[in-house]
Image (spheres, rainbow, N blue to C red):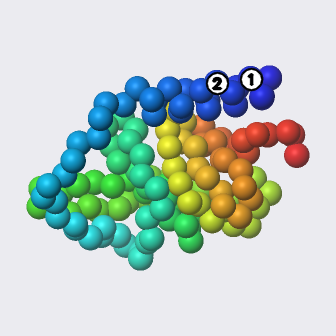
Amino acid sequence: MYLDWIKSVLLSLLCLGLAQAEPIKLNEFQVFPINSSKQIEPSGLTIKDHQLFTVCDDGSQIFHLEISENGEANANIHRNIKVGELGAMNLDMEGITVVNDDFFIVSEVHHKLVRVNGEQLHWVPDFGS
């Protein structure tokens, strides 16, 4: 059952990547800081409900990025990830994406994905361990 679900998630991600149009070439752009109550090193970026989200590799939070009128981004904690619920002490989050309504976070230290489904956390694949 989990293997079928994983295959469908991976196929969805592949199809999303193939369905994108040609990339838009940027001729002019500006880089603005990300303001936060604590210093963060963003590691990955995704869109959910037309909003930007990121994770920080040395933290346990999903951050919502709000873009101000002057173009600066303000990072606010959207969700604290209680890593203890996964039997872990650290995730070292290195990427984030959204499939359907769930966040998926890459754990570099565990070489697995974490599925954030509402208030529930699951390893992917989850073999019941």
**Amino acid on which the number 2 mark rests in the picture:** Ser
| Marks 1 and 2 in Cβ contact (< 8 Å) | yes
* SS category of the residue bearing label 2: helix
Q: Nearer the viewer, residue 68 or 25?
A: 25
Label 2: which residue? 8
Q: Quadrant of the N terminus?
A: top right
Residue lying at 33% horizontally and 55% vertically, measured from the top left? 65
Asked which quadrant contains residue 109, the reply is: bottom right
> As drawn, is 52 to the left or to the right of 10?
left
Residue lying at 43% horizontally and 64% vertically, measured from the top left? 42
The answer, for residue 96, to whether it is visible in the render is: yes
Q: How busy is the neighbourhood of tag 2: few (under 14 within 10 Å), some, or many (20 plus)? A: few
Label 1: which residue? 4
On the image, the x and y values in percent for residue 16 come to 46, 29
On the image, the x and y values in percent for residue 128 come to 87, 40
**CA distance for labels 1 and 2:** 6 Å
How many numbered marks are there? Answer: 2
On the image, the x and y values in percent for residue 116 come to 60, 43
Residue lying at 60% horizontally and 37% vertically, measured from the top left? 117
